Image: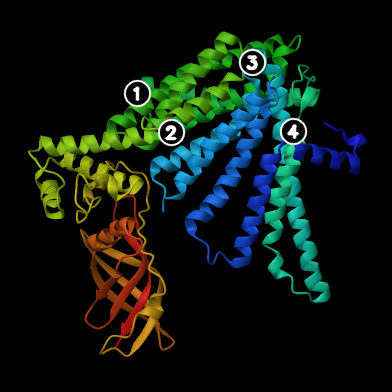
Amino acid sequence: MISLKRFSLADWLKQVGSACRRFPLALLLLVFLTGYLMFLIHNNGNHVDGKWAFFFIFYPATGSLLAVSLQLLTEDFKHRWVAFLTQMCVHALWLGVSLYLTQFERFSVQQMVGVSATVVTMVLSLFLLCFYRKDDDVPFWNFAQRLLVALVSGLMVGGILTLGIILFVQSLDWLFGMEVNGWFPYIPTFCLVLLAPLLAMSQIPEGKHKRVHYIAPYTGFIKGVVQYLFIPLLLLYMATLYVYAAKILFTWQLPVGWVCYLVSASMLGMVILIFITYPLQHEQGNSIFKTLTRLLPLAMLPLLVLMSVAIGRRLSDYGITLSRLYVVVFNLWCYAVCIGLLLCRNRRIWWVPASFAVVLLLISVGPWSIPNVTERRLQGEVREAFMASGIKQLPLNGAQYDNWLKTADKEVAESIDAKLYYLQLDYGYDSTLGLIQKDAVVGLMDSHRGGTVVSEDSSMRFYNNSENLMRNVAIPHGYTHVCAVQGVDFVKQNGNRMVLDVHAWITATVTTYRFEAMLNQFVERDIERNHHNSVEPLILDNGDVVLIVDNFSLTRSQQGTVTYASISGILFTK
């Protein structure tokens, strides 16, 4: 690393040149990504296939991240051919994954979670991959803090340059009347997509600077902030949770759901504090401080038990969901981290983020992943409930499902309706087609207000993407005016029936038209859209006017009732 005192333009250019030679593939992908984004800006996204646009953005962005991580790992290999083959094999695998993802119009929950977990693992691998050897924790800590500074400084410089250049370009318009607004989108693209990562890569330690075993002592100010501000704040936070745990034991009441978030925040604060203060574990003295920080994992264990009880209550009351299973695994990982830190006396820390990355990847990718397990488990519970009530053949049509809801045990009906609603909401309608047919509408039970709803998401959206409807539809016989309708309108819902008030501009005034529609009409069209590129538009007729719905979005409340509709389409009036 070049110190500020010896900084010069020649030194900076040398650093940038070294980064280009060190990370050539990452730089090539970033140059391509920048050029492609500028191409999209220039053409306003026209004449571009959506699937290939995703590939040409996703693969260069993630591939450049992967290239830097692999270079940091393989540059320490003794044999260059092993390093080359390792990089090529991993890149070929990720290229195949990116091409596979390109074929989908929309990602499933499993794909979205798997891709997100993989990208997070790539980011963590930047810090971890080249420090897997024994006794590498001190070099790992030095490298991690320098890499973090490099990433933050690169982003800051890119952001400052973006604002500065935009202001300069705007001044040309203010002072000389030059039309320069068209250049604005290109500036952040160049500065943040290409320049900022290049500056960050130029600051990543290499050679002997990559593995520094010496830790500079903390200044008195930093040590004081940690000892007299951060640690007391964390202890106060944990003490509050201990008081709450005592209240639970005294009143003999199960903990509420917020406990999971509060304990997780305490755990995160403890891990960050141990990482920040890691150099102090290797300094002479500070015995009281060392003892205190080494006892923190022990103090965290009872709080993790409290978190486990809270999770158990949520699972018992409301059943499994994707997020709850992730919280279960996170809780188990926290136990392992606290026990491991106690055994190593906080002197080994590399394995903490490394284990998190491995566990996250294992539970998020593959047929054994939590999203797949959650879907299969909920489908199995619904199927078992149907069979237990005497139903021998699935899927149920809309009438059969409505009749089952009326005749089944109330609590069972509420639970199954909520689970089907959760499956459709998070996994799409294909996840329930083996259980109920597309004309069955779920999530309408008024008793959901009692708190048995499995899903905690308040939004349900449907889309129908037919294009150029205005130009392709002629005015029907008997109608004299046509106008476009686009906006959000409130909805009154009674079971499957909805009443929509649609507002349209007719002869320079806003007129409201009321339509009655069935919720399953919207549901069926969304299901058809999942299987076909285009579907017939939805036509609503109230006897006086006709509304052809092009795009629509229905939003539900926490209770499952549709509250308003965002509709765009064509309205014909007489």
Amino acid tagged 1:
Thr
Q: Residues within 10 Å of mark 1 (few under 14, many from 20)?
A: few
Contact (Cβ within 8 Å) of mark 1 with mark 2: no
C-alpha distance separating marks 2 and 4: 30 Å
Indicate the secondary structure of the residue bearing disc 1.
helix
* N-term mark: 2 or 3: 3
Residue 133 is labelled as 3
Identify the mark at residue 365; answer none if there is no mark. 2
Mark closest to the chain's N terminus, 1 or 2: 1
User: Foreground residue, 81 or 17?
Assistant: 81
Answer few, some or many: residues within 10 Å of disc 2's Cα (few below 14, many 20 plus, some between 14 and 19): many
Disc 1 or disc 3, which is closer to the eye? 3
User: What residue type is disc 2 on?
Assistant: Val
The residue indicated by pointer 1 is 251
Q: Secondary structure at mark 3?
A: loop
Does label 1 or label 3 sit earlier along the sequence?
Answer: 3
Percent coordinates x, y for residue 259 in the rendering? 43, 30
Q: Is residue 267 above or below residue 57?
A: above
Q: Earlier in the sequence, mark 2 or mark 4?
A: 4
Secondary structure at numbered mark 2:
loop
- Could you classify mark 4 by the number of other residues whose Cα lies within 10 Å: few (under 14), some (14-19), or many (20 or more)? many
Kind of residue at badge 4: Ile
Q: Quadrant of residue 87?
A: top right
Gap between marks 1 and 2 measured at Cα:
42 Å
- Expressed as whole percent of the image width and height from the top left, the position of residue 244 reads 44, 25
Residue 500 drawn at (x, y percent): 29, 69
Residue that badge 4 annotates: 204
The image quadrant of residue 366 is top left
Query: In terms of sequence position, does the residue under pointer 4 or pointer 3 come before the other?
Result: 3
Q: How is the image coloured?
A: rainbow
Can residue 246 be seen here? The reply is no
Total labels: the figure holds 4
